[in-house]
Amino acid sequence: MLRCVMSRALLASLCLLASSTCPLTASAQAKQNPWALATAPAKGTAKSIGDYSAGCLRGAAKLSLDGAGFQVMHPSRLRYYGHPELVSFIEGLGRSLHAQGEGDVLVGDLSQPRGGPAPGGHSSHQTGLDVDLWYWQPKAAAKRPLTREERESLKSRSVLDPKTSSMQADWSKRVLTMLRLTANDARVSRIFVHPIIKRDACNAETGDRTWLRKVRPWFGHDDHFHVRLLCPADAPECVPQAPVPAGDGCKELDWWFSPEAQEDRKKGQAKYQAKVGKAPGMPAECRELVDKPAKGPLPLQAAAETKP
Ligand SMILES: [Zn+2]
């Protein structure tokens, strides 16, 4: 989601690249961004093309708005498209959660119908291999499908308790169940969560710890977790991310709780902003998937980094 990685200043810098009139609102960006205007997938065999943060998606599959154990939120955004493997992953997670009595998982953004950069959105989620899933669910969602109005108006909620700097007790079991199920899916490359959630998972796990390796700490991500799949097999156009380091990653967590972390976060954003515009564009094949905008340069080019 936008708040994962993108500051207002970053948005302003993206505006500068896209237009001479700044700041642009999300809707104004949408008008200049042909990826946001696509309302249906590009025809062809499903293909994730390029980098998670500079790529696109051909032959996308559409996730149903409802299924066993999942419900799609904010459907008006049309961000429920993904590579068929991502759709299959979400359906499988929903079934498993349902079977464990955990109700439904509420699904945030996957990709736009043809992937690409989303206005007012993410730096990644461009190739149909990323999805944001909510930890929290309102009681109603465990009993019935939410109404269209509820889906558009409800916002995800943090599951952290500021008093204890740990997960809220009511949500802890559910969160750990969701993360364990997700990490144990061989298609999953990594999962981004708030550092406190990773620490709680490290402390809670007394059995097999191998799944913790894929759970990666990142700023934000206290109201949703971001799941990234590996490039599908036989997909030479898909640019993979380096494998996660060996080990469960628990001993390396201290830095995230140090004063330097906040400092670095600010610096990180500055570095990130400096990179915007210098990043390589998306592969040429992607440009065939959308019409050029009537005016102005082609779409916001996200940085090549593969952050959530
Ligand atoms: Zn995300």
Image (spheres, rainbow, N blue to C red):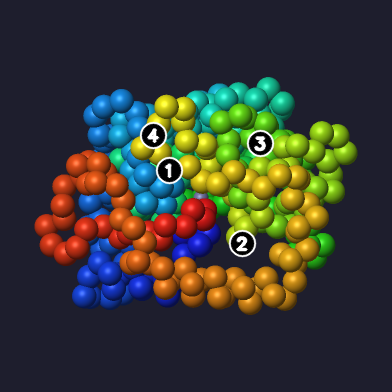
Q: Can you identify the residue that label 1 sits on?
A: 239
Q: Can you identify the residue that label 2 sits on?
A: 219
Amino acid on which disc 4 is placed: Pro
The span from disc 3 to disc 1 (Cα, nearest Å) is 21 Å
Say whether residue 168 is left or right of residue 189: right
User: Residue 128 sits in which quadrant?
Assistant: top left
**Label for residue 183?**
3
**Label for residue 236?**
4
The span from disc 2 to disc 4 (Cα, nearest Å) is 31 Å
Q: In the rendered view, tell whether residue 290 sits above or below residue 82.
A: below
Mark nearer the viewer, 4 or 3? 4
How many labels, in total? 4
Which is nearer the N-term, disc 2 or disc 3? 3
Label 2 CA crowd tier, 10 Å (few <14, some 14–19, many 20+): some
Which is nearer the N-term, disc 4 or disc 3? 3
Amino acid on which disc 3 is placed: Ala
Image location (x, y in percent) of residue 234: 42, 27
Amino acid on which disc 2 is placed: Phe
Label 3 CA crowd tier, 10 Å (few <14, some 14–19, many 20+): many
Image location (x, y in percent) of residue 82: 41, 35
As drawn, which residue projects farthest toward the right? 206
Residue at image x 49%, y 75%?
Answer: 270
Whether tag 2 and tag 4 are in contact, CB under 8 A, the answer is no
